[in-house]
Every structure is written in C-alpha cells, then in structure tokens.
Image (cartoon, grey):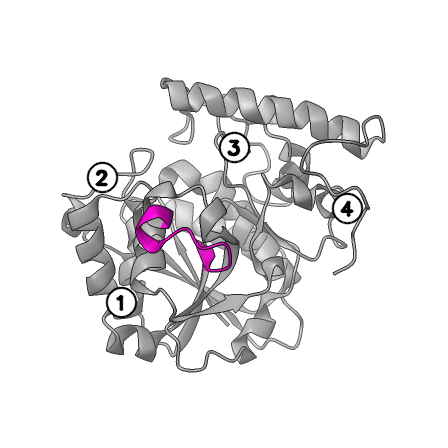
Amino acid sequence: MNIVFCADRRVLPGLHVAMYSLLESIGEETSETRFFLFSDDLFNYEIELLRKTLSVLKKKFTLERQRLDTKQFANLLPLNGSSAAYYRLIVPQMLAVERFLYIDADTLCDVDVSILNAFKMHDKPAAFVSEAPMAYAVDRFVADQLGNSTTEPYYNSGVMLVEVAAWRRQCVTERALEYITKQNPPYHDQSALNVVLRGNVVTLDERFNCIANMRKHWPVLCQPLGSINRLIHFVDYPKPWDLLGEWVNPYYGLWHEVLAKTALKNFRSWHNTPTRRFPNTAKALTGYKKLFKDRLLLASYSRGWLKNIKGVPAENGMAD
C-alpha cells in the first residue's frame, strides 16, 4: 500500500496522528505499508520521530522522505503561508509506483484504506469523495464556472487515489498548474482538479473522506474510535493542534486520543514550536468563533442535552 503525505513543519502533530491512525487501521493481511513524505523543510530528527511513532504498532512499514524544489510554486499564492497544498500535483511525476493514496495531514483514520488497492479505476487518473453537489459547493468560483449543477459532484482533494500512468498520460499536473497560474482560484489545487478532471473521475465512498465540519456526520463521529469506520478530515481552522485547539476544536478529544499514542504525546498548542500561530486575520478569528460554537453544540448533542440541531439528521443514522 503506497500512501503519500505532503507537509511542512507546521503540521507535524497532525502528521503523527494521521500516519499512526492509518497504519493502525490497515489490516494485518497488508504485507507492507509504504509512506512517502514530500516536504522541503523537515529535519532528520523529525523524520526519525515519525518512524518512532509508527514503530510502536509493530507493523511492517517504510517511510521515505522526498525533497521538493519549491521554486516552481513561487508565483502561486500560498495557502496559510505554505505551498504544501500544491505538492500533491507533482507527486505522480516523481513516484515510480502504479498507484498511491494521497491524504492530507489534518486527518484521523478509523477505516482500513488498504481495500482501495483493489478499487476499480476504469482508466481514470484519480478518485475522490464528493463534498457536495456543484450547486452547493463552498467553492463558488468553480461552481459558477461549471454551471452550478444540482447533480454534478464537487470533489474534495484532501484524499485522492491516483492511477499514475493515466495521470501522466493525460498531463493532469501540467493542466492543473496552468489553470492555477491563469485563474488564481480560491481553493487552489482543489479548484484546479475539479476543473481539469471534470467528468474524468471515479467517486469514492464518503467513508474515505468524512468532512468533520458537516453536521450530518455528527451521529457517527460521536462514536468511540474503532467503531466510526471513517477517515475523518478536519477541514476547518483552527486544526486540533493549532493555538488553543484543546478548548476550541470540537474533535480535539478524539484527535488527542491518538496523539497520546505517538512520540509527540506531550505536545500542547501553546508550546513554542513552528506549529504555533496566532489568529491575526478576520478569517482566522471567524474560524475560532465558528468552531467554538460547534464544540458547545456537539458536546450538548453527544450528551443528549440537545436533539434538534440544524444540519444534524433527525434519525441517529449510524449504519454504514
């Protein structure tokens, strides 16, 4: 199983949780899990800490760092001060594998992703989970460009199954980077992939990219680890590891349950590390306000104090 992460030092706590939970959830019948970590700034000791985290599980794995020349992204707008969002676009050109699963670092896995090794791709270059119909996508820039269909899916690029030969043959990297350069879309690589791969994608089951901020997922996300059967994606800011995430992020308890098993178990958001960043924009402050509200609502919902919350299914649909 080939799994790819693209990260910089500011997401290291998230990376430990994502990688540990992935390896823990992969079935014993998988002979080896191969992690490829694309980064331009991680130190050797940080890579060794990741290996220490994974070694606890006593499963066969390899962890290979791939260095990137980030100059090719110099003219592209960074996301939260980082160019890491663009790295995934060039991974298919750099890896000598037939297929890989790309996963964002702001995730926690409670499902066996190794079943995707046998997933039928039908000669398509990539497979994603649909975030919403195009008409209801948060990416209004792309939705308006593509016609705001109520049936056409808008895909989240945080989890991406890639068939390398088809990707290369169809020049997806080149087309996506060209689109970003010309259009400067608000959702960066995700916007580009939805445009250049329109009609040329296989849809994955939503188990493999469960967007945590969607209240429709609250019933299942209130379950204990081991029974959620989802790959959980913390798309909102602040992330569980961001400053004061302990008190603001609704899923901090779930995330910390895994962090406590890693080599970064003593990490706290206020520690003076590259991870710490202060909310110094209106957008960031709005994110804190929104997540704190959701934390209060989710806590009340999970305890049975509130039952009728906008966006939460009336029936407690926890079946897969």
Please say if the residues under marks 1 and 3 sit with CB atoms less than 8 Å apart. no
- Kindly report which numbered mark, 3 or 4, lies closer to the viewer in this rendering: 4
Which is in the foreground here, disc 1 or disc 3? Answer: 1
- Left or right placement of residue 20 versus residue 271 in this view: right
Q: Identity of the amino acid at label 2?
A: Leu
Image point (33%, 34%), residue name: 80
Front-most of residues 16 and 196: 196
Which residue is tagged 2?
A: 77
- Mark 1 or 2, nearer chain start: 2
Q: Where is residue 105 in the image (x, y as percent from the top left)?
A: 47, 47
Between marks 1 and 4, how big is the CA–CA gap?
39 Å
Residue 294: horizontal and vertical position, in percent?
64, 27
> For this view, does 274 lie left or right of residue 315?
left
Marks 2/3 in contact by CB < 8 Å: the verdict is no
Specify start and end residues of the magenta stretch as a single range: 143-159
Residue carrying label 3: 241
Reading the image, the residue beneath label 1 is: 172
User: Which type of secondary structure does the marked residue at label 3 adopt?
Assistant: loop
State how far apart marks 1 and 2 are (Cα): 20 Å
Relative to 109, is 138 above or below?
A: above
Q: Earlier in the sequence, mark 1 or mark 4?
A: 1
Q: Comparing marks 2 and 4, which lies closer to the viewer? A: 2
| Tag of residue 2 | none
Q: Where is 246 relative to 175, above or below?
A: above
Asked whether 2 falls inside the magenta stretch, the response is no
Q: In whole angstroms, how far apart are the C-alphas of marks 3 and 4?
A: 20 Å
Pick whichever, 136 or 113, lies toward us.
136
Please, what secondary structure does the residue beneath circle 2 have? loop
- Crowd band around label 1 with a 10 angstrom C-alpha radius: few (<14), some (14–19), many (20+): many
